[in-house]
Image (tube, rainbow, N blue to C red):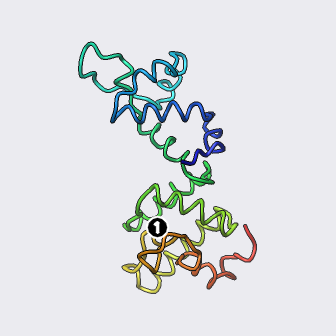
Amino acid sequence: MVINKKYLNTKDLNVYDWFLMHLVFLNSSEDMSEELIQYLPNEILNIYEEKKYITKVKAKKKTDHEYKALRLSKIGKEIYRNSQILDFTIQDEKLYEYLVTLFEGIDKPVGNPARIKQLLAWFRVETTYSRKLIYKSISTYIQFMIDKGKEQYISSLENLIWKSNNVFSTKWSLADSKLYQFIQEHKKELHADTTN
């Protein structure tokens, strides 16, 4: 399991915080209250509640310890999941949000959020392209397809970044990236010869 410490640091969290979030995450499927009592002091719990990382569900029994009802909130789950993506940054998170808005604006599917985040981080590292160029390339691709009257053929964001030509392929390759191919074909217009 990957723990992206740099991403955690941008949220003012560390590996110990991730460990606590992991315990709370597990708490929804199995009782982790004893471990949480041992490792989660009240002052940290108060901070997590203040930052809305944690929420409490209704206790099933009055005798249950209050920690048995702890769950990760939507914000907490997002941080927990994003911190498990190699090379993912807060800037990638913003890029993802912009791209989702772009695809929703043309009523096209996005794909699996966790997978897209992994692919965005991988694509950025693999190509050394800036987030600005990636966004510009995707929006240019969409406009290009619309101008050609081929909007029905616009791939989901996930498949645009990477989709294997082979069902058995698990290794990501730029050769299987429609986005990378598009950038290569339109390098001059996109100014992709520099890593801007």
The C terminus: image quadrant: bottom right
Residue extending furthest toward the left:
61
**Amino acid carrying mark 1 in the image:** Leu
The image position of residue 115, as x and y in percent, is 47, 59
Q: Does dot 1 land on a helix, a strand or a loop? A: helix
Picture quadrant where residue 166 is located: bottom left
Residue 109 in the figure: left or right of residue 48: left
**At 53% from the left edge and 33% from the top edge, which residue is drawn?**
19
Q: Residue at x 41, y 59 (%)?
A: 112
The picture quadrant where one finds residue 177 is: bottom right
Residue on which disc 1 sits? 157
Relative horizontal placement of residue 14, taking residue 48 as reference (left or right): right
Residue occupying image coordinates x 46% and y 55% = 114
Residue at the far right in the pictured view: 194
Please determine whether, in this image, residue 70 is positioned above or below residue 66: below
Up the image or down, 26 lies above or below 160; here it is above
Q: Position of residue 161 (x, y in %)?
A: 52, 70
Measured as percent of width and height from the top left, residue 116 is found at 49, 61
- Up-down relation of residue 28 to residue 6 (above or below): above
- How many numbered markers are drawn? 1
Callout 1 crowding tier (Cα within 10 Å): few <14, some 14–19, many ≥20 = many
Residue 155 at what x, y percent from top left? 43, 74
Instruction: Depth check: give the residue in front, 192 or 88.
Output: 88
Q: Between residue 22 and residue 132, name the one nearer to us.
A: 22
